[in-house]
Image: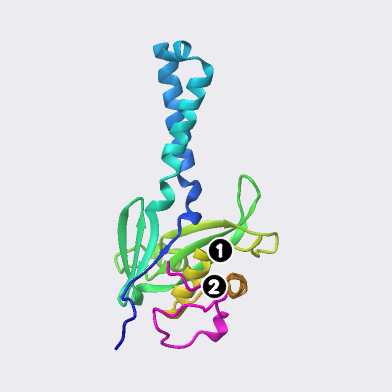
Amino acid sequence: MNTAPRHQTVRLGFLWRAAGAPIGCVLALAMGIVLADSGDAGRMGAVPALLLSSAAVLGVALPVPYGFWLRADDHGLTLVRAFVPRRYRWRDIQGLTMDAGQDADSGAHRLVLLLRLTPAPRRTARAARDAHLYGPVLGILGTTRDGLPRGTEPRRLAELFDLLRRHGVPLDDRRYADLVLTAHGYPTLAHTAPGASLSARPAACPDAA
C-alpha cells in the first residue's frame, strides 16, 4: 500500500526575510512624523518613541517569512507569497533560472532564483524573446565573488532544489545546486533518479518540510 504523502511543503521564508524591512521602515518613519506633528513624541520622550518605531519595523518584517512558501503535489506548484496563492502546473515550469551577478547599488555578489515559466500566447513579442526570465522570483541569495555559496545555505534551499529536480525541472547552475544539496545529505543532480517519488528524502535529513 502506498502511504506516501500527496503534498510536500517547502517553506522559503529565509529567502524573503528582508522583504518586510523596507515596508516596516516606511511605517516607522510615518509614525515618527505623526508623533512629532501631534506633539506626542515630546510627551513620550525620545526613548519610548524610538522603541515604538522599532516595534513597527519588527511587527511588519517578522511575519513576512511565514507568508512565503511553495507547496507541491502531483500536478504542480502553489507559490504562496504574502498569503496569496498562485498555482503553476508542472508542464508550464521550464526550469529554475539562477542568475548570478552583482547588485547595482551595493556591488554585493548575489544569485537571483526565478521559477521559469512558459510564456502565455497572449504575451508580447519582447516577453517571448526574454522567455528565460519569465516567471516569479523566489528569492535573492548572497554569494561569493565566484558565485558559490558563502557557507552552508539553509536546508530549505536544498529541499527546494531536490523538489524541483525530482519533478524534472532543470536547475541552471548545477555547480551551486550540487554544493547546496550535498551539504544537507542529498545526492547531486547527476544522481537524480527518473520518476523518483515525491516523498523521497535523504537519510541524513529525516524530518519533513
The C terminus is located in which quarter? bottom left
* Residue occupying image coordinates x 47% and y 28%: 53
* Residue occupying image coordinates x 40% and y 78%: 199
Q: Is 192 included in the stretch rendered in magenta?
A: yes
Q: Are marks 1 and 2 in contact (CB under 8 Å)?
A: yes
Q: How would you rate the neighbour count of disc 2 (Cα within 10 Å): few for under 14, some for 14-19, many for 20 or more?
A: some
Residues in magenta? Answer: 185-209
The dominant secondary structure in magenta is loop
Tell me if residue 10 comes above or below residue 20 in the rendering.
below
Q: How would you rate the neighbour count of disc 1 (Cα within 10 Å): few for under 14, some for 14-19, many for 20 or more?
A: some
* Coordinates of residue 25 in the picture (x, y in percent): 48, 34
The three-letter amino acid code for the residue at tag 1 is Asp
Secondary structure at badge 1 equals: strand
The N terminus is located in which quarter? bottom left
The residue labelled by disc 2 is 172
Rendered image: mark on residue 99: 1
Rendered image: mark on residue 161: none
> Viewer-proximal residue, 98 or 159?
159
Label 1, label 2: how far apart the Cα atoms are:
8 Å
